[in-house]
Amino acid sequence: MTASTNALINRRNEITSKDDKTTARTSRLRHITSPNELDGFRVIGVQGLDDVAALTREEAQDILPLMSGTGATAQVVVLVSSVFYEKSGRVPPRALEVRQLIRSRFNLSGSAIEIAVAERAVLRGLLDRSVQAESEYSISSTYQEDLIEIITDALSRGGSDVHIEARKGVPSRIRVRLNGELVVRHDDCGYEYAYSLMQYIYNTLSHEGGVAFNARSQQDAVIPKLPLPRINKVVRLRVATTPTANDGHDMVLRILPLETLSEPKPLDAMGYTTRQAQQLLDAISLPQGLIVFAGTTGSGKSTSLANLLLLRAQQMEGRFKLITAENPVEYLLPGATQIPVVATELGDPQWAKAIRACLRLDPDMLMVGEIRDEDSAELIRDAVQTGHPVLSTVHAGSSLVIIDRLVGLKIPRDVLASPDFMSLMAKQDLLQTVCPDCALEYAEVSRRPTLRKARLDVLSRLRLLTEHLDRVGVDVDVNNVRFQNPEGCEKCRHATPGVIGRTACAEIVTPDRTMREMFLDPAKRGELLAYWLTQYPRESQMDIAINKMFAGIVDPSAVERKLYSLDWVVKRDVDYGVGQCQQV
């Protein structure tokens, strides 16, 4: 008899001896009557879940190993079906083999591994629970990977927002806002996928929102940090959801790069005229006063305010205390104390609470993300009147309408008219800038039938405007106008064909004494507008846009999409007798 044969016989006798001991103890095996008795345990040793014992799904109907904890605290239960056990009246050899494999794999003591008996339905319930958990983890991982890829792609192309639109009966889409326009990324991703992606984003990733995603109400939340490893960036996402008609749902993700702004941008590079840049610099240099920007979402208000704060910090060489209250914080400013505000709806007391906190922190300059209710307006009024420069935003249709908006928030007109209260009012939007490498010239568009046909109306209004400006003595040359090339080129085609970016287009008002006197009387709104248009000619937002158009920076259609028709200016000039304009 060979040595190897002796070894095999000895090993068989060892197992048989152990089996005999185990058989003798079978009467003491615990009987598991419900999967709930093993809450916290996970299935191991089954193919597709954990292959340590390589049990097939068929074998798992009768032998099911489960583990709780790890390392020294690990506990293992090897369940044997009562049917399988009762056939022989003893623990089957396969169960013992599984126990030994698990013991060796995890270096466990014998006391850490229990063999127990249960009905097949209990084994099946535990297996199904683990399969479902594994599936949910796999699905969650897929959703997270998809979201990271969507945001990475959007940010790489200059995107600002992602729209997830779940619809029944019509295509569900995912769209990205590039250079102010919505571009389709997925034209039909399916309702179930879009809806499940929304649920995952809100329930798993977001903070400071509701308890769970509610398909029947509007909700807001924040994803404070989402790493994008492919482009080595980290972003914050502001989440807004709403139900739509026909059981549809929308989720919009505003992308906020989580980065520190170390150096301010030159104001002219952002799109401000020379005079506007000086107005802004003068305003932030004042020892007190309110600077208010108005504009829609995505108009660049927050970027402009952050840049002004950096400029002031640069002027003061760090010798002052800058405090901000924002919902959420959009840009990290070196040296600033930035307070994130969790406010989910209009009138939320968190805004007022944050502003009060700012005022107690001895600020030299204060920036409040939005004057959104009467409480925050009152606190900002007090901050200005106690000698602080304050920057903020409101929703208003023009710079002069900011006064009416603040009056509506219960700031008295006599306060707004005081010499040291309103430092500056601005209304701005972002206009698409044409790609200089492929932009179409006016002569080419006018000459080529296919190009001319698509732009007949705007060309007609452009000629009317040019003739009018020539009559009133404004020096413009229509041949300098450039049009967006719909085909684009290598420089711009990856985002919006024919567009290279966006430029700030603003109107800025620095109130003088005559204007402040008019603030006192609501009946003088029309007179106030007429005074500003005539005493500060061609400084309105529309006039600034026209200057940019005649400088070949923006397409005439981009002006009309964002602001007014070109011939509107002709009528306004006739009505108010507006004179010559400043040049870009």
Image: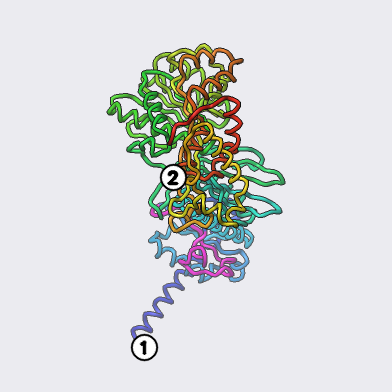
Q: Residue at x 38, y 25 (%)?
A: 284
Q: Is residue 416 left or right of residue 212?
A: left
Please name whichever residue, 160 or 135, is drawn nearer the observer in this view of the structure.
Answer: 160
Please name whichever residue, 253 or 31, is drawn nearer the observer in this view of the structure.
Answer: 253
Q: Residue at x 60, y 68 (%)?
A: 84
Name the secondary structure under disc 2: strand
**Above or below 452: residue 310:** above
Please name whichever residue, 310 or 256, is drawn nearer the observer in this view of the structure.
Answer: 310
Please name whichever residue, 374 or 204, is drawn nearer the observer in this view of the structure.
Answer: 374
**Residue furthest to the bottom:** 1
Q: Is residue 388 visible?
A: yes
Q: Residue at x 52, y 67 (%)?
A: 47
Q: Is residue 23 visible?
A: no
Residue 55 colored magenta? yes
Which amino acid lies under the numbered mark 1 shown in the image of this protein? Met
Which amino acid lies under the numbered mark 2 shown in the image of this protein? Val
Q: CA distance from mark 2 to mark 1?
A: 72 Å
User: Which residue is disc 1 drawn over?
Assistant: 1
Our reading of the magenta stretch's main secondary structure is: loop
Magenta region: which residues? 43-72
Residue 88 colored magenta? no
> Within the image, what quadrant is residue 366 found in?
top left
Q: Is residue 277 left or right of residue 464?
A: left
User: Which residue is disc 2 drawn over?
Assistant: 235
In the rendered image, the quadrant that contains the C terminus is top left
**Above or below 514: residue 50:** below
